[in-house]
Image: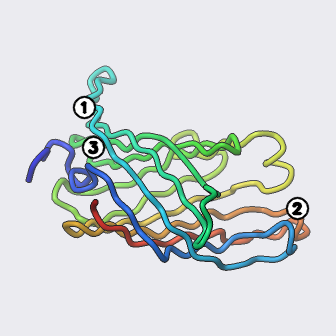
Amino acid sequence: MANEEFGPLAGLIGSWRGEGGVNVSYDYEQKKVIEETYTEEITFKIVGDVDNGKQKIWCLDYITAAKRTGSDDIFHTELGFWGWDPVRGEVMRCFMVPRMSTILAGGTAKADDTSFSLSAKIGAEDWGVLSNPYLLENAKCTRYESSYKIDGDTFSYEENTVMAMKSMDGQEMDHTDKHTLTRV
């Protein structure tokens, strides 16, 4: 495997595109939870090895942009880093979205794994979630869970961002995304 030092992340390096992703989220105009499809483009680039004292993280940076099916307008974008710590067997993803929210999610994996899961929760000192004050009052992310599968030129993911929604009387809802992309 090329770039084997990146462990389970090695297969992500490059550019990906997919159509038919499924997004379930709250629509403020319709005042209800809706399901819609989207297209997405993601690019993962090598940063290299990052020394953190005695810890070495093999790091990729990435950017993604999603458009609702049939629209030219980007409705979701994010940028961040993926990391692999081979000594601890940890996969990490740190990203932010323009709503001024940041997630640092982590999980365990083996170097040759082609699937793995990550999680984060609000208030955690390690794998955690941070949001701006407006989001904390109106759409607070309490938990983030995701799973990934890399199979050659196919990359699939499922994400669940659990949010306490003021517009739903404080009830929690599952904002989910799932997609399969192919290497371009």
State whether residue 62 is above or below residue 67. above
Which of discs 1 and 2 lies nearer the camera? The answer is 1
Which of discs 1 and 3 lies nearer the camera? The answer is 1
Q: Secondary structure under badge 1?
A: strand
Q: Measure the alpha-carbon separation of dots 3 and 2.
A: 39 Å
Q: Which residue is mark 2?
A: 166
Q: Which mark is residue 2?
A: none
**Viewer-nearest residue: 89 or 145:** 145
**Which of the 4 quarters of the picture holds residue 147?**
bottom left
Q: Residues within 10 Å of mark 2 (few under 14, many from 20)?
A: some
Image side of residue 170 versus residue 100, left or right: right
Question: What residue lies at 16% left-to-right and 59% top-to-bottom?
Answer: 112
CB contact under 8 Å: marks 3 and 2: no
Q: Which one is earlier in the sequence, the residue at label 1 or at label 3?
A: 1
Q: Which residue is mark 1?
A: 48
Q: Secondary structure under badge 2?
A: helix
Q: In the image, residue 15 lies at what x, y percent?
A: 32, 53
Q: Which mark is residue 88?
A: 3
Farthest left residue in view:
1
Q: Which one is earlier in the sequence, the residue at label 1 or at label 2?
A: 1
Which color scheme does this rendered protein use? rainbow
Q: In the image, residue 137 lies at what x, y percent?
A: 86, 50
Q: In the image, residue 67 lies at what x, y percent?
A: 58, 62
Q: Secondary structure under badge 3?
A: loop
Question: What residue lies at 26% left-to-right and 24% top-to-bottom?
Answer: 54
Question: What residue lies at 28% left-to-right and 23% top-to-bottom?
Answer: 51
Q: Quadrant of the C terminus?
A: bottom left
> Residue type at mark 3?
Arg
Which of discs 3 and 2 lies nearer the camera? The answer is 2
